[in-house]
Image: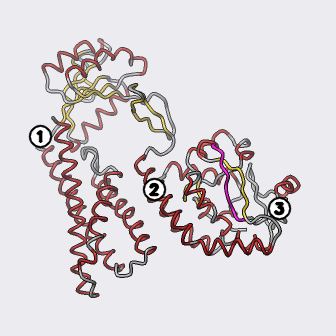
Amino acid sequence: MLKQYATFFRRATIIVDMVLAAIAFGLAYIIRDQVEGLYFFSSYLWIIPFLSVAWGLFLYILGMYASFRLKSTLDVFSIILRAGRTVFLPFGCITYLFKIGYVSRGLIGYAFGFTIFLIAIEKMTMVIFFRYLRQKGFNFRNLLIVGTGRRARSFITQINHRREFGLKIVSVIDPDKSRVGETICGHQVVGTLEDIPDILINTAIDNVIFIVPRSSLNAIEKQVLCCETLGVTAHVAVDLFPMQFTQGRPESLLGLPIMTFESVSDKHQQLIIKRLLDIILSGIGLIILAPVFLCVALSVRLTSPGPVMFAQERCSLNGRRFKLFKFRTMVVDAESKMEELMAFNQMEGPAFKMDNDPRITPIGKILRKLSLDELPQLWNVFQGDMSLVGPRPPLPKEVQQYDFWQRRRLSMRPGITCLWQVGGRNKIKDFDEWAKLDLKYIDEWSLALDFKILLKTFPVVLGGVGAK
């Protein structure tokens, strides 16, 4: 029943937020129409469902509709701002690419400002209201804590000091009988594992939280099954290993409950959107930039003997091989001359970088300076071998020279641009520094970060910053 109420409440909240986004756009239209004289409101009706659905979608993806119990007001406001930024950027791109001139920047700015304001007021009101109820003793979840070790004590202390979470520790038990009667963080240990069925039958318990040593996991199987039989939610603390940056996530694989330890982003909904945006934007880019492709191809063909395109095997996600396409900027036999130039490599590590590489053609220097040689990689993005944003794809022979920790660069789909690209490109001479930037990107990845990198890429490329 509680889950049904939570589902209903979540859906109702999503609808309210979408309605608020529509109201915010209406308010923005009324105010801006007084200032700049907009088109008839009917001309903008298509925007309302677009923005409403986008706001609801991104608020959901960013975790707004998960339980409010453990969210601070800062967490809530941060989600709203990130959702606004994530909605605003693609909407701005659409209006720019399709040249929808009657949608003014003032109207867009007011619409997003009002939406953020209205949703923030709604969420803050909800947070304050529910915390008020919990301070008065309502809307609490009763907990049974199993365990009295260091991790259990830390958890109990946090619950004791954060009454606004709406969590109330009703009983504490421990597998060790000698602990019965002790007081742990203000709560008396009332029994052992054998007492759990009686406690669940005679006491209103909403959640049982097992925080026991790894050596005791086998001992709690019967008690977890007891919770299942009685319909009481059981949680088992499973920080099994001292991971540095990996987060454990429970999943089900063919009916088998497993704990997944994933060092790459687990924001799967956002990753799906990232791939959809890759397809859409690379497809649009291939069409719009077709004249540029033709001009660059002619310049390569007329100034240097050999093929227009250069295809090279690179490594993609988790070591998959693919053919990366570029406009040719070097002489035809450039690969065979690589060994002769290794002594002039200016990059410390497996990658090769060299100022004034003699293999580069005159037109190739210009193409590289403006990054025009990278444009065919839009086809790699469209195919799915690459993404618009991600670590640059390495050569297989470079991967073979990687240190063990550097191989995590391959745990995310490679991209045309990345933190290294916007950080100065060839100004970075140490591959370790390059790899650390890529791992920073992987660990902190979000759609908002991708948009930020894309926006920074344009001035860097146009200015030729760090390009050789």
- Whether label 2 touches label 3, CB < 8 Å: no
Q: Could you tell me which quadrant the N terminus lies in?
A: top left
Q: Is residue 465 left or right of residue 243?
A: right
* Amino acid type, residue under disc 1 in the picture: Gly
| Residue 290 x, y percent position in the rendering | 60, 71
Residue sticking out furthest to the right: 340
| Residue 248 x, y percent position in the rendering | 43, 35
Q: Is residue 22 left or right of residue 468?
A: left
Between 34 and 327, the one nearer to me in the picture: 327
Q: Quadrant of residue 177?
A: top left
Q: Which residues are magenta?
A: 320-327
Q: Crowding near pointer 3: few (<14 within 10 Å), some, many (20+)?
A: some
Q: Could you tell me which quadrant the C terminus lies in?
A: bottom right
Instruction: Give the alpha-carbon distance from disc 2 to disc 3, as whole Å.
Output: 36 Å
Instruction: Give the alpha-carbon distance from disc 1 to disc 2, as whole Å.
Output: 46 Å
Tell me which label, 1 or 2, sits earlier in the chain.
1
> Mark 2 sits on what residue?
276
Rendered position, 167 above or below 41: above
Residue located 28% across and 44% down the image? 70
> Mark 1 sits on what residue?
137
